[in-house]
Amino acid sequence: MILDSKIPEGALAEKWDKHKFNVKLVNPANKRKYDVIVVGTGLAGASAAATLGELGYNVKAFCYQDSPRRAHSIAAQGGINAAKNYQNDGDSVFRLFYDTIKGGDYRAREANVYRLAQVSVDIIDQCVAQGVPFAREYGGLLANRSFGGAQVSRTFYARGQTGQQLLLGAYSALSRQIAYGKVKMYPRTEMLDLVMVDGKARGIITRNMVTGAIESHSGHAVILATGGYGNVFFLSTNAMGCNATAIWRAHKKGALFGNPCFTQIHPTCIPVSGDYQSKLTLMSESLRNDGRVWVPKTQEMAQRLRRNEITVAQIAEEDRDYFLERKYPAFGNLVPRDVASRNAKLACDEGRGVGTTGLAVYLDFADAIKRDGQDKVAAKYGNLFEMYAKITGENPYETPMRIYPAVHYTMGGLWVDYNLMTTIPGLYATGECNFSDHGANRLGASALMQGLADGYFVIPYTIGDYLAQMPANRVETSHPAFAEAERNVRDGIQQLLSINGTKTVDEYHKELGHIMWNYCGMARNAEGLTKAKGMIRELRADFWRNVKVMGVNEEFNQTLEKAGRVADFLELGELMVDDALNRNESCGGHFREEYQTPENEALRDDANYAYVAAWEYTGPNQPEKLHKEELKFENVKLTQRSYK
Amino acid sequence: MAGNNPNLKPMNLTLRVWRQKNNHDAGKLETYKAENISPEMSFLEMLDVVNENLAHTGVDPIAFDHDCREGICGMCSLFINGRPHGPETGTTTCQLHMRKFKDGDTITIEPWRAQPFPVHKDLSVDRSAFDRIIQAGGYVSVNTGGVPDANAIPIPKSIADKAFDAATCIACGACVAACKNASAMLFVSAKVSQLAMLPQGKVERKTRVENMLAQMDKEGFGACTNIGSCAAECPVGISLENIAMLNREFIAAKATSDNV
Ligand SMILES: Cc1cc2nc3c(=O)[nH]c(=O)nc-3n(C[C@H](O)[C@H](O)[C@H](O)COP(=O)(O)OP(=O)(O)OC[C@H]3O[C@@H](n4cnc5c(N)ncnc54)[C@H](O)[C@@H]3O)c2cc1C
């Protein structure tokens, strides 16, 4: 198989405009003859479904929550980037492009990232027109703040609830199309398989999560917008239901998986407090605009703190190590996430961590409160401070927050070409579930941007090009391909229900999470990864012998839902380990301990690894086959990333 | 976090939990023990622990809705000791922590009780009526593309902030569960006022309020009798002012309606 990224010819800045002109169009009267399936209605899916409905296609949209308004995009806090340059501080499309490529440690495709930066400005216009209440200045114009990895203020926000407001905007557009009958919405419906006819994606198999009914849906094209797979780690900032099932099952049908090991560990999350912990809560990166990250200078002092022999307040200014400000004076606390996370881990590994477990560093607002007053700080971050207080029982206005890195985002995902099509014709992937724009590390406030760029402004053009070239006749769900896929889904479910073992699904999931976090988390090495691979294989075999899934399929059965997802994580986890083992370099969030500079920075190997690793499924328990998409950098120079 | 919390003694609790196999089943309260519960756990983590124990003893785990566990998705929806989302004001069930309870407490957990929210199973209900109300008009009718530059629509900060306060509704349904009439007025009013306040939403303000209220009635939600339990129990602090604004919008719409 040759990976063709289909990057249009021409100068970087002209590619997208030219491509939009060159794509084939479906004439308005013919659009109603085409059916598009959209799986997932977060930012990426809702925006696509609404826009395709507006254009006149018949859309069927699916989500596992009880309403599209609850997709995990809702939880995004900090903001969304756009190269509006409203602040007149030197921003431009090229700068946003450059920051994103550099932030991603030179492992993303230039053409896609440039397009993302171009359409970023349209997103803000669209959202404002929908009534999204972004933060504003007293003059009535939009406010901005800065985020990690950038030296300009280009982040638009709605208090600490930007994702909520953007999703509600997309949800309102989607609701309007549902009312018009152009989109049919299937909530509490999970996609369990992809259906292929003549080598093309032509439908999906779903399970109704209330009744258990297994159903077939046919369409001319299928868009997956099912979000990230961070829950492989069990503990993450993702929602409990976030999963890899849709993309993993598409992968098993032939869609290559790009850079599976590229995971983002977010530096500012509330630390783990016990084994019962079910998820980790993010404290938005925006807090690093005003919060200062520090640990005690010495191990002894950290130890006394942990034993409650002294309090934070008793640590004198000169005994505090503001390690990010010290090591990276140019960016200070606003270095990119991978850098901030790794340094927090280093400080804790040196025995200077705080909190009872020693796995935490301080995020301190004392200076900001002194400088701006508590009211001003509360106006910016009030809801985050409240959330912190609710979870920890402590008041962050009085004592510094304690934070630690946690799994947050997956840069990896289904490999897609410039048109966002996977290696299966007619199957598209948008939003977090594709691998595209963030390389080895995503910059803050860029995921919301990507999801909405894909859904509002990219897929509506590129999918038209595909549909225009295919006949409008429908494949009936009576086609044998559907029957066979349904049978496979039923068999899989039956198998899970019939094992009747002794260990619960959560127990397996937690065990997998531990393996992934310990060996394929913030720091990785060949020995650990090799060990992890064996452990995952054993755990997976044990799962299929000994998992306990109660009840029947024909009911509301949350254990069964989880079991299917964990079964997929047990396979994906191994591929992540393989990918991490293959990539003998450090880049962005992928830190291989063997490859680092004397100052502990990630050491890339551009000569050998400036490629996207795209993996092909070859059968159960078989090694996956590696394909490489070489990355060409024609507009930026590859350098050692420096935030000093 | 343990080090800074003086009261970390594990607790033993008695739970009375609504169990109902499906929408046709009558349902009843069952009693379970929740033992060795850390005060640092969230309420849902406590239920996770109970469910793991139930699974090990061969009892079907308790079904309940939850997803983000950060208080924003609006999925969690438990009626705890007679209050939607439990004893802590301004908090969703997922953000409620066990430190709010005492060793030896008995806790009663029920689903939202309202006719337009039929039970799926145990503690999970069907809130699709809310989606249909939004579909009736909770949007600005703009297609993708062809909109003005974002800064071409200046909006006074005070108005933008107020619109945000209304827009923050998470559609959990606590307002309906708290209301003795099962009215959805707070939910509807939040969307109506958000859009009525903003210039973008003003164009359709009349038809919006009429159509959304008509849908609300059609779904079988009760009338608002101005008691205010909805706002008192709202986890995100949606204010009663929104209902006042909705009423004004409705009267104005009726007086000049094109929608006859
Ligand atoms: C706590 C948190 C804070 C964040 N803050 C920011 C921020 O400030 N700025 C920023 O840019 N990014 C942020 N991010 C990242 C960003 O929110 C996500 O990457 C982005 O919202 C993902 O959008 P999506 O549409 O791809 O997926 P999601 O919003 O996760 O939507 C996935 C959809 O797929 C559906 N689905 C999944 N599996 C199936 C299946 N098998 N069958 C049917 N449906 C399925 C779900 O129901 C849902 O509708 C944050 C992320 C988290 C977790």
Image (cartoon, coloured by chain):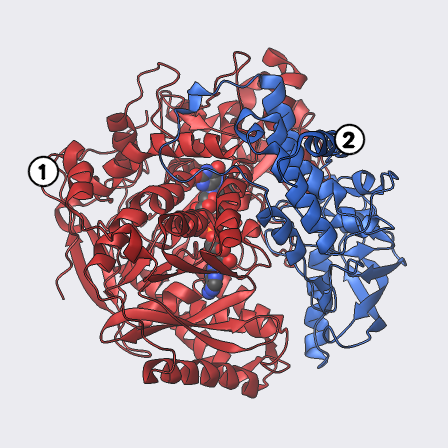
Chain colours: A red, B blue
Q: In the image, what residue type sits under mark 2? A: Ala
Quarter of the view holding residue B252:
top right
Mark 1 and mark 2: span between their CA atoms?
58 Å
* Residue closest to the eye, A204 or A263: A204
In-image side of B198 versus B153 (left or right): right
Task: Identify the disc placed on residue B244.
Answer: 2
Give the x, y percent position of residue B47: 72, 62
Q: Are marks 1 and 2 in contact (CB under 8 Å)?
A: no
In-image side of A47 versus A297 (left or right): left
Mark 1 residue element: loop
Give the x, y percent position of residue A204: 39, 71
Task: Identify the disc placed on residue A10.
Answer: 1
* Residue closest to the eye, A316 or B197: B197
Report whether residue B22 is seen.
Answer: yes
Specify the quadrant that holds the C terminus of chain A.
top left
Q: At 25% across and 38% down in the image, what residue appears?
A: A115
